Image: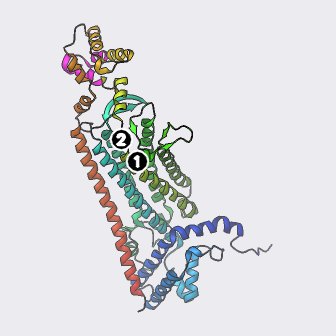
Amino acid sequence: MTDTSQFPDPVYRDTVLAPLFDAAKAHYAGPVRAINRAHLVMLAQTGILPGATAAALAGALSAIDAELDLPAITYTGEHEDYFFLVEAELRRRLGADVAGALHTARSRNDMDHTVFKMVLRTRADGLMAQALALAEALIATARRERDTLIVAYTHGQPAQPTTFGHYLGAAIEVLLRDITRLSAAREALDHCPMGAAAITTSGFAIDRHSMAELLGFTQPLRNSYGCIASVDYVTGLYSAIKLMFLHLGRVVQDLQFWTAFEVGQLYVPNSFVQISSIMPQKRNPVPIEHLRHLASMTVGRCDAVVNTMHNTPFTDMNDSEGEVQVAGYAAFDSGARVLALLAALIPACSVRADRVAANMDAACVTVTELADTLVRTEGLSFRQAHEVAARTARAVIAAGKPLGAGHAAFAEAFRAEVGRAPTLGASAYAEAVSPARFVALRARYGGPSPEPMEAALAAYAGEAAALATTLATRQTRIRTAEAARDAAFARLQPE
């Protein structure tokens, strides 16, 4: 039976090729243009193409860039994809032989992975810049709230006093580690696949290092098989992004808990509050809910990309290319929304000192320091001091009194446990269980008192500045390469 059908089948065209072409229009036209120009410059510099051929190709590429109205083009299937559309335009202008010379010593295999890396490095740099902006906002807020008391919770229950600045410091440290992971994953995007061609490089004397430099990479990716087969630049990047938003989601969950009516230690200003349509007394801090689900969506989108690579062959394959690459960009989009909203929301919030004080009183959150004080001043063992403190806490909670007003209960518990009266008087007792003193005494490295907090904030600022310098260096290299590439390409063209 004779097969008289022609490629592409209409269903394949509409379900696969057309969406890929639309994605190329939206995301890949710029990188393909850069690769065409850089590759032509390299072919001319190495003498692989004669000057006249390079000049003709340069002129035609410039004309195509100027004249092709890419957004207006609707995919028809006449050309398989965007790459072949450009090649067809070159053939129309120059003839098949000259047009085909541009494809000397390259393949769509090495081009595709180079394009994907170029798009990802731009998006990764943008996300890193936003994450650094969030870090700066959190550092500034932590400095402002360095001494602002809050209740710290463990297992969902009031635990000890700390400060809002100290809490934010913990979040900042995780964020900076996440940015460092993102930056490390970004390094894999700095190795250029061009020159690998289909799999094994080329018999032509190409200059892979020059090609990498012209495209703003630090160097070629060494193994040519790995250039077209390894996708760890994808899985590593999305794994790093996933962790950032998984971790930020935990902070967002705390914000939700702290704003609950029963806790109420965090105040969200009216600009971030929506009022119920039927219950006018309700202040709904719904941006926090949006933060939570956007962070979760970002995590899920990263997982979708990484999981698509599972059990795929170690070779060039469509599983790692157009469809999944485009799907991954949604993670950058939702992640960027989280970073922007968090950077606006957290500095705008404030701590409700009255609610913090009430919760501290109700939960006896300073009782740990009472036990510590008894060890230091009364000579008790920690276990014995812990029992006195526990008895005191139970008594004042049962009486509905704050811990600071519980000296009588404390004295009774002390006599019952130790067999004598305490030397700790009422005023010394009140000071021992004061939240401010609790924090001030915790002056160890990493603690919430002012001295270690100031050292921590300075360290965070230094780490953020170093990461920002790394980002700026990468962006400068790309801009410098773009200028050099365009200048070299312009020199190829006839006057």
Is residue 187 visible in the rendered image? The answer is yes
Q: Residue at x 45, y 51 (%)?
A: 338
- When asked about the image quadrant of residue 9, the answer is bottom right
In the picture as drawn, the residue positioned furthest to the right comes out as 1
Q: Nearer the viewer, residue 111 or 394?
A: 394
Q: Amino acid at mark 2?
A: Ser
Magenta stretch containing residue 375, yes or no?
A: yes
Query: Relative to 365, is 472 above or below?
Result: below
CA gap, disc 1 to disc 2? 10 Å
Q: Which span is picked out in magenta?
A: 368-388
Residue 486 x/y as whole percent: 40, 79
Residue 288 x/y as whole percent: 46, 44
State left or right for residue 467 relative to residue 279. left
At mark 1, the secondary structure is: helix
Image quadrant containing the N terminus:
bottom right
Q: Nearer the viewer, residue 288 or 224?
A: 288
- When asked about the image quadrant of residue 189, the answer is bottom left
Residue 345 x/y as whole percent: 40, 47
Q: Residue at x 40, y 56 (%)?
A: 185
Q: Amino acid at mark 1?
A: Leu
Is residue 317 visible in the rendered image? The answer is no
**Callout count:** 2
Query: Relative to 129, is 247 above or below?
Result: above
How many residues crowd mark 2 within 10 Å: few (<14), some (14–19), many (20+)?
A: some
At mark 2, the secondary structure is: strand
State left or right for residue 403 relative to residue 337. left
Magenta stretch containing residue 481, yes or no?
A: no
Task: State the residue position of label 1.
Answer: 345
Task: State the residue position of label 2.
Answer: 350
Residue 339 x/y as whole percent: 42, 52
Q: Residue at x 59, y 67 (%)?
A: 20
State left or right for residue 313 relative to residue 332. right
